[in-house]
Image (cartoon, rainbow, N blue to C red):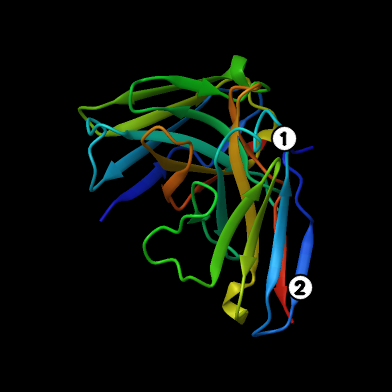
Amino acid sequence: QSVLTQPPSVSAAPGQKVTISCSGSNSNIGRNFVFWYQQLPGLAPKFLIYDNEKRPSGIPDRFSGSKSGTSATLAITGLQTGDEADYYCATWDTSLGAVTFGGGTKLTVL
Amino acid sequence: QITLKESGPTLVKATQTLTLTCTLSGISLNTTGVGVGWIRQPPGKALEWLTVLSWNDDKHYSPSLKSRLTISKDTSKNRVVLTMTNLDPVDTATYYCARLWGKSYYFDYWGQGTLVTVSS
């Protein structure tokens, strides 16, 4: 059972917008930055969002992150079939003294 | 170009010790701000963080695996080594190493991963 809770799956049509939630607590999301990773089928995870909302170089602005209280959200607009992947949120948990990942969300672009 | 590559055995027996190596290219472990972490992923399951070795040599371990893990670095060979003792079939997973940057705990560059199967 992950410390961070994500929906197991989300889906939307090409061109549409989807959001993926990540729920935590005051010991993790509530006091630390949130990061997001994309894992395409059969590949290693890819760094997507850092410090709640910043995009590394090369990540299109269709991907955006936000945080409010003890929850974070990844939004993807203009969905493409190539966005089909598993998405993971992560953060530092101050109480555990550990990096913690969410359980992952499988995005299906219908 | 920064790359990381994991190496080690693909098949180990239960109760044995696993040693995996992460070799960095394009960036030196001596560079201020550079750290390395290990993350694993059982087949069909989620990512699980194992350990990090930060740029200032701080080490952190997963609370549930702390007694079995050791992370160390060899700066002369620009590599980081993960040791996991007393393996069990549930430790079967793809093991990834990834670069940790600065004081944050995000992983910006990942290795391709190496699948380790633990047989009973």
Residue A19, x across and y down, in percent: 70, 65
Count of numbered circles in the view:
2
Q: Amino acid at mark 2?
A: Ser
Residue B38, x across and y down, in percent: 50, 36
The quadrant where residue B84 appears: top right
Quadrant (top left, top right, bottom left, bottom right) of the C terminus of chain B? top right
Same chain for mark 1 and mark 2? The answer is no
Instruction: Please tell me which residue lies in front, B92 or A31.
Output: A31
Q: Quick check: B92 left or right of B4?
A: right
Q: Quick check: A86 left or right of A51?
A: right
Q: Nearer the viewer, mark 1 or mark 2?
A: 2
Q: Residue at x 44, y 66 (%)?
A: A59
Residue B17, x across and y down, in percent: 54, 23
Residue B33, x across and y down, in percent: 30, 34
Q: Which residue is mark 1?
A: B90
Q: Residues within 10 Å of mark 1 (few under 14, many from 20)?
A: few
Q: Residue at x 45, y 59 (%)?
A: A55
For the residue labelled by badge 1, is the local secondary structure a helix, a strand or a loop? helix
Chain ID, mark 1: B
Q: From mark 1 to mark 2, how far is it between C-alphas? A: 31 Å
For the residue labelled by badge 2, is the local secondary structure a helix, a strand or a loop? strand
Q: Amino acid at mark 1?
A: Val
| Residue found farthest to the front | A68
User: Taking the image as drawn, is residue B111 in sight?
Assistant: yes
Chain ID, mark 2: A
Instruction: Please tell me which residue lies in front, B67 or B1.
Output: B1
The quadrant where residue B101 appears: top left
Q: Residues within 10 Å of mark 2 (few under 14, many from 20)?
A: some
Q: Residue at x 41, y 19 (%)?
A: B58
Q: Which residue is mark 2?
A: A11
Quadrant (top left, top right, bottom left, bottom right) of the N terminus of chain B? bottom left
